[in-house]
Amino acid sequence: MEGYSPTVVDHFENPRNSGVLENPDGQATRSNPAMRVHMMLRVEDGVVRDVRWQTRGCPASIASSSFASEMVRGWTLEAIEALQRDSVAKAIGGLPAAKMHCSALTADVLKAAVSDYRKKIEAHASAV
């Protein structure tokens, strides 16, 4: 995997937190023609306590999902909402320019999962 940081290689070869999170508090899926990322969050007191993901795509997309699932654990919802599209790539040690869309999609889906969580909370509050 020439051109990838040791962290990218490690997360591709040894992905963390892959799988399904039963009854997630927030979840979202985003895709493009080359990849699909699904993220599931467990939230307690406005803090992400657990993250699971399912990704179909290239090594960079799998590594980005794995790394991000560890990176955002313990973050507030606001911190995830402030995530920039290049934040995951920077934190993982960089990606080739042709693979930046992988980390950008990962950031997008994390923010969408937070949005899903917020919508569920609002719906629950208005139903009470």
Image (tube, rainbow, N blue to C red):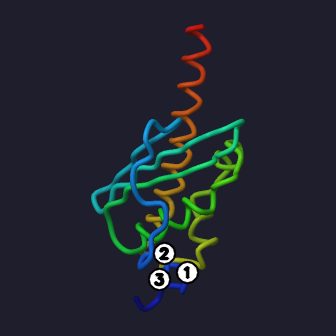
Residue 11 tag number: 2
Cα distance in 3D space between marks 1 and 2:
6 Å
Instruction: Give residue 119's position: percent from left, percent from top.
Output: 55, 26
Quarter that holds the C terminus: top right
Instruction: Give residue 114's position: percent from left, percent from top.
Output: 57, 40
Q: Tell whether label 3 touches label 1 (CB within 8 Å).
A: yes
- Residue labelled with disc 3: 9
Position of 121 compared to 24: left or right? right
Q: Secondary structure at mark 3?
A: helix
Q: Residues within 10 Å of mark 3 (few under 14, many from 20)?
A: some
Q: Tell whether label 3 touches label 2 (CB within 8 Å).
A: yes
Instruction: Give residue 96's position: percent from left, percent from top.
Output: 48, 80
Q: Secondary structure at mark 2?
A: helix
Question: Which three-letter amino acid code belongs to the residue tagged 1?
Answer: Thr
Cα distance in 3D space between marks 2 and 3:
6 Å
Question: Which three-letter amino acid code belongs to the residue tagged 2?
Answer: His
Q: Secondary structure at mark 1?
A: helix
Q: Residues within 10 Å of mark 2 (few under 14, many from 20)?
A: many
**Vertical placement of residue 93 versus 122, above or below:** below
Q: Tell whether label 2 touches label 1 (CB within 8 Å).
A: yes
Question: Which three-letter amino acid code belongs to the residue tagged 3?
Answer: Val
